[in-house]
Amino acid sequence: MSSPDEAEAPEPGIARRPVEVATAAILIGLAGLVLWDSYGRGAGWDGGPQNGFFPARVGWLFLAAALFILFQSFRSENQVFVTWRQLAQVVRVLGPLVLFVALIAPLGLYVAAAIFIVVFMGVIATARWWSILLTAVLVPLACFWIFELQFRVPLPKGPLEAALGY
Amino acid sequence: MDDLSSLFTGFQIALSWHNVGFMAIGVVLGIIVGVLPGLGGPNGVAILLPLTFGMDPTSAIILLSSIYWGALFGGAITSILFNIPGEAWSVATTFDGYPMAVQGKAAEALTAAFTASFIGALSGVVLITFVAPLVASFALRFGPAEFFAVFLLTFCSFIGMGRDNRAKILASLCLGFLLAAVGLDSISGDLRMTFGSTELMRGFDFLIVVIGLFGVSEILLTVEEGLVFKGKQAKIDLKVVLRTWAGLPRYWATLVRSSIVGMWMGVTPGGAIAASFMGYGLAKRFSKHGKNFGKGEIEGVLAPETAAHAAGTSALLPMLALGIPGSATAAVLLGGLLVWGLQPGPMLFVEQKDFVWGLIASMYLGNIAGLIIVLATVPLFAAIMRIPFSFVAPVILIVCAIGAYTISNSIFDIWLMLVFGVVGYVFKKLDYPLAPLVLALVLGDRAEDAFRQALIGSGGALDVFWANGLVTTLVLLSMMLLFWGPVGDLIAALNRRGRAEKPAAAE
């Protein structure tokens, strides 16, 4: 109906200003943490600079920069930080990635990688099932050959590798 | 000439069979890394660094620096064929490169870009060959105060010359320093900012941070725009290459100008991006075809590529001579030196002659090998971009995870990589520059040591930083660079206000 209007109106999403403010607030918090820790251990002079001396000075600079960014963020133009559609895409990648990293400890990297590929490509859903399975088997095998056999770099292994005698 | 004979020895080292092999492998890997989204110079080198721990340092740095050359070449392929800049300094290449590809002149554009890169890189290497030894022998007289002044110069020029929001550059730098301070303090032996966590005792390894900030975050940014790339076809045959080369001498002025701009900006850190835009801007102003820029003018490809690569190569000069990297990738290479047990800095030229000159010789050879390989294999690498991203992305992420794990065999590091990936995503979207963070993280401990040793030497009096002519000059230069940008901004702002007020007053 009104496609030209839709093209001009920005896509809905998370606004930039709240993200900018939140980031600045986190940075201010970090600066506070650094200053608290440094002065707690001693940031003065005791026959030489104490070990908190340098971080404390950097911490003050950091605090000043973060406060200035916070001040700027209120004056800046409010654009869209990320549209909902883009955010959905990012989550579709980030979700399987978190699962992958979580599975490395119990299952070993190779099995986790296979599961990651299946989940990732399944979620994105543009590939045929047999090409997904083939990738999921071949990529970990190739990694195993390169790292474990060629370069002798041990990667985390789980019950499957143990059962196979590695 | 003593240096020339050293260089000759260097060529003998670099030309051994296995080193030439590493060079070829490095260039091919580098091009792949440069073409794939989510892998760029810094994190491509970072991921492969653990694999070189067991190698002889000279071969290892030849392999890694060849990856760097390959990545520089590869960035141009995606800029021209896909309108996607592989690295920030390839952005200016897309202005005229992509229009040329649209007009069916992709092969000319690519040949021009590669040749320009080669010329730029070569001028950078020549600069390193002749100037780096001088700088290093000069720097042998430096004490802690002078070294701190050089670090200060590096960081100030980042803030003063940067194109980003200055408060954000400063915040990014400080964050890098603070991350570097976490863990064991090298002077007092105390633990700092670990908050009782045993995992944090080791501190933040900058390789993990680099893989997260540059690798994972880049994937997240790439998927935002969907998962399909649309590109132009290109096939380069010898006739096109020769024809393009025959046309190049006409543009000698552009090439020379861009090389000089690049070399100058490269030695000052953070310069490659600025250099590519400056090279483009200057060429546009002085060229006879300035009006056609942006519509597919070959000069618009030559100018930024030459400048960017002259800068990217010159960035290795301060890394070799002073131990201060001029770019994020140079910072990762510097981290490699530490891992291989080499102490970066001016002493390298005295104690590790073979290593230094082998590396410099490999820069000449690596760029020649790179030019030949990239010209011969463009269709192959363009084909990589046609593999669906849903296949490529998980593989890149798995490789990133493996790279993060192998640095110190810790699964905690993979989680850290993930966290820094998200941080990098948010930072990039909010225009926080990432290179200062990495640089400060790498240099943080050494800058702090220099600062503290200088103060211990002077008994805490700050006047050690203007005690002699040398250190005073360096500090003054730092201050000039620091205020160069802000003062320029202020003058521009006042001018604008002045112009805005004039019409108002006339009414």
Image (cartoon, coloured by chain):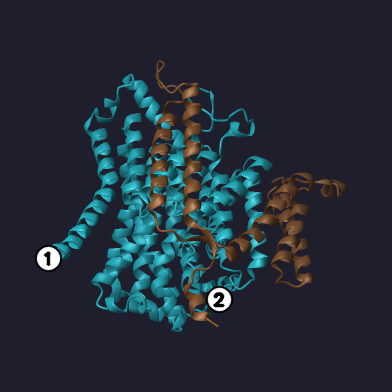
Chain colours: A brown, B cyan
Residue B461 image position (x, y, % from top left): 30, 22
Residue B42 image position (x, y, % from top left): 51, 53
Tag shown at residue B230: 2
> Three-letter amino acid code at disc 2?
Lys
How many numbered marks have been drawn onto this rendered protein structure?
Answer: 2
* Quadrant in the rendering for residue B202: top right
- Would residue B221 be found to the left or right of residue B166 on screen? right
> Three-letter amino acid code at disc 1?
Ala
Secondary structure of the residue carrying tag 2 is loop
Residue at 63 percent across and 34 percent down: it is B199
Residue B158 image position (x, y, % from top left): 36, 47
Residue at 36 percent across and 48 percent down: it is B166
Residue B187 image position (x, y, % from top left): 48, 24
- Would residue B23 be found to the left or right of residue B257 on screen? right
Between tags 1 and 2, which lies in front?
Answer: 1
Judge by depth and name the residue closer to the eye, B12 or B507.
Answer: B507
Q: CA distance from mark 1 to mark 2?
A: 53 Å
Callout 1 and callout 2 share a chain: yes
Residue B366, can we see it? yes
Q: Image height check: is B245 above or below B68? A: below
Q: Residue furthest top?
A: A47
* Quadrant in the rendering for residue B115: bottom left
Q: Image height check: is B11 above or below A60? A: below
**Label 1 CA crowd tier, 10 Å (few <14, some 14–19, many 20+):** few
Residue B332, can we see it? no
Q: Residue furthest right?
A: A163
Judge by depth and name the residue closer to the eye, A27 or B80.
Answer: A27
Residue labelled with disc 1: B506
* Chain ID at mark 1: B
Q: Image height check: is B153 above or below A47? A: below
